[in-house]
Amino acid sequence: MGLFNPFKKSEEQPAPPAEEQPSGFFSRLKQGLVKTSRVLNTDIRDLFKQEGRLVDDEFLTELYAILVRTDMGVGPAGKIRDQVKTDFRGRVVHLSEVLTTVKTELVALMQQPETPIQFAESGPTVVMVVGVNGSGKTTSIAKLASYLKSQGKSVVLGAGDTFRAAAVEQLSIWADRLGVDIVKAEQGSDPASVAFKAVDFALQNNKDVVILDTAGRLQTQTNLMNELDKIRRVAGKKIEAAPHEVLLVLDATAGQNGISQAKGFSEAAQCTGIILTKLDGTAKGGVVVPIRQTFNLPVKYIGVGETPEDFALFNAEQFGDALFADAF
Amino acid sequence: MFASLQDNLRTALKSLRGKGKLTDANMRDGLRMVEEAMIEADVAYPVVQDFMARVSEEAMGQKVLKSLNPDQQLVGVVHEQLIQLLGPVDPSLHLEKDVTVLMMCGLQGAGKTTTCGKLARLIGTEGKKALLVAADLQRPAAVQQLHVVGESVGAKVYSEENASDPIAVCQNAVKFARENGINVVILDTAGRLAIDEELMEQLKTIDRKIGPDQCFLVVDGMTGQDAVNSAKAFNDALELDGVIMTKLDGDARGGALLSVKHVTGVPIKFIGISEHMDGLEPFYADRMAGRILGMGDVLSMVEMAQREFDQDEAMKAQKALEAGSFTLDDFKRQLEQIMRPGLMKKMLGMMPGFGDMANMLQNTDHEKDMRRLRGIIDSMTREERRTPKVITPTRRQRIAAGSGTSPQEVNELLKQFDAMSSMMKGASPSELIGKMQRGDLVDPTGKMKKNKVGTGKRLSTKERLAQKKVRDKALRKRKKR
Ligand SMILES: Nc1nc2c(ncn2[C@@H]2O[C@H](COP(=O)(O)OP(=O)(O)O)[C@@H](O)[C@H]2O)c(=O)[nH]1
Ligand SMILES: Nc1nc2c(ncn2[C@@H]2O[C@H](COP(=O)(O)OP(=O)(O)O)[C@@H](O)[C@H]2O)c(=O)[nH]1
Ligand SMILES: [Mg+2]
Ligand SMILES: [Mg+2]
């Protein structure tokens, strides 16, 4: 957790193993982010109508506006602006210089080892999926299941959203379409017991991965947040280290409330990572920047559409590249 | 996480106290804070800039009123401007026709289907019949979802098996409504991204072919900067008639509403405050303004308190107070109402920035405190309970011994009773909660006071009066328009 320092060399990251990448990762990510970067780049380009521009107050305010519009919040945006000010104030600069600075900033901050799912050493790996209402949990589970299946893993889904109307049906349809097993109970039944049964099913049937869906909830709803802990504990009864992963599904359209979400869900359910969804829209998902800064919670996957294929591993370098792809 | 704007401003503008006028220079820090607060509340940046221009124009040259501190004055200006921008309010659904058609639209997962159900329920309570139309053929099980929702509110649901064309479904549904004496048709369309040209085109086609009477945009209360883009696109495509913001039961500041209002100009109709079908409220600009400023939705909280309180008990206490016969027995009953496990926490949970406080309350043993207080009161004679004045030091000793407490604790309780009964003259229990929230009252259990958590606003009576003046002025201004 540090201040922004654009010129601090980010630690060398080993290139991600090629087989971990879903097909055409880069093109898909780029496709999803192209609208985003179009906005950013056009804006920054506008700042440089001429060859170079004097870095003055007006310039810095415009830069700040562009950064704020990514939803990164006043803290990070202000720090980047101030850094640019320190480095370039009074100079006439070129587009590529400032862009490199901003990109380096973001990439350095978001940098992380390639950490997809941490699989259990033996026996089923339990992945719990949590988040606020409508963020894309169920759809992301379908995507993750499809992704893992394509890697040769056997997957079972636990339909733990027993609250929302037809949530179980929604996940069942996905299970059908993907050809994976699903464990479910009636609407209104105890989600912890569904988790228990799903883990049990995986053990009995030698499944590699159990993905547990949960009902959407707001981080301020203490009782519902406590329920997540109960689900955790129940999953841990059958397999000691379970859940091995707890993924927070965060909607890229979310603004600063994303920070409160990350805090609340991390405290209640000990999240291990984020799936950032709906990046196919114009929203930029910049709130993951302060989230990363404050809670050190990495983004593991991104969602860029409504089909199972619209899914990719998050990679800071590529994320940054895609954001500014058109600029270089 | 979100300190209240007022707290920050108080520090920033301290030097202005009694300085005469608000000027560009002396307000700079304050204005910067307002700007940051707006961004933190998720108001889109271009809207923030516009808003700041209005605020500084309005504030500039205003005399620092003697009765007000500059921070309050600036907050007052901000609050007033926010209310102006968020209004005018029009919660009516305009169901004048034989068959009124309402169309819902918005991004994926915003809360359209749930809100359809809530509206159908509302319409039902007005004695009209609503038909829900399953026009989301995109999301898996969306049709089933609408059926479950419809059933739970007793509204008919129109859907077609194996349908693939939402336009046809909507057309047939309206026909069905006309033939079956239904008053209001609610179209539940699929979620779509504003940049999805194909799906936006489809929405336009529905709009053209069906000609809905009202078209509502459903916006997630947690939305950030992107709200301006999507709202603009939906408004350009459809000419919206109203906005409904959902998921405001959490701690989202909901600043996106200002963005949406700014780019569409259409009235905000309702807010969603729960997943349940009764979780729909009319929109109030002043409450939302307070929320965006991080001052908490005190009024909503008070309303909730009203719902939660035993109204009979409340009436009794009210009568006792008015008659000047408020006794320690009444005091005890009131305490029991207020200190009921979970209630306080629930209400604090509704306050942006108060989450920590709510958690803290979880760790305090209210049961024990209640037992202690009850013990003290129970150890008094009837006379003492009715007329606490008669309690002499000797009697105090006896009461302490009888309740296993110390004479100091007995004294403490009596003092609080005194403070409370004078404070409560004319205040209903729910107002009392509001007072407690503002820190006017000490917590009867003494816990909150001891723990001294930075909870944001603490206004004195004088400060409150001053604020009320500003609010009233804003209200008058609004009524005039
Ligand atoms: N455009 C887009 N839509 C998504 C994405 N992920 C989920 N959705 C949609 O968002 C809505 C809510 O998703 P769902 O998985 O049901 O959310 P849940 O309530 O968190 O389980 C659905 O309409 C999904 O199709 C995404 O990455 N991009
Ligand atoms: N807490 C809360 N949840 C809501 C509210 N309105 C909708 N939801 C939830 O948000 C999620 C998405 O709602 P849905 O109606 O399916 O959205 P749609 O995709 O736009 O039709 C569901 O889990 C709903 O229960 C609200 O006002 N408060
Ligand atoms: Mg779901
Ligand atoms: Mg829906």
Image: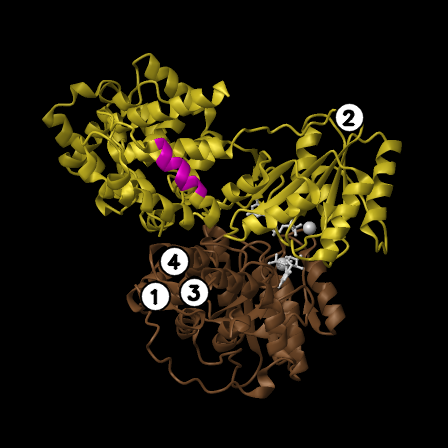
Tag 2 secondary structure? loop
Q: Are marks 1 and 2 in contact (CB under 8 Å)?
A: no
Numbered label attached to residue A289:
3
Beta carbon of the mark 3 residue lies under 8 A of ligand 1: no
Q: Residue at x 78, y 37 (%)?
A: B211
Instruction: Classify residue B79 by image quadrant.
Output: top left
Q: CA distance from mark 4 to mark 2?
A: 54 Å
Numbered label attached to residue A84:
1
Q: Are marks 3 and 1 in contact (CB under 8 Å)?
A: no
Tag 4 secondary structure? helix
Tag 3: amino acid: Val
Return the residue at label 2: B97
Where B97 sits versus A41, above or below?
Answer: above
Q: CA distance from mark 3 to mark 1?
A: 18 Å
Chain letter for mark 2, please: B
Asked if badge 3 and badge 2 are on a common chain, one would say no
Chain letter for mark 4, please: A
- Which portion, as a residue range, is magenta? B50-58
Q: Position of residue B45 (x, y in %)?
A: 46, 49
Q: Residue furthest left?
A: B393
Tag 1 secondary structure? helix
Q: Residue furthest front?
A: A50
Chain letter for mark 1, please: A
Numbered label attached to residue A59:
4
In magenta stretch: residue A296:
no
Q: CA distance from mark 3 to mark 2?
A: 50 Å
Q: State the hue of chain B.
A: yellow
Q: CA distance from mark 3 to mark 4?
A: 23 Å
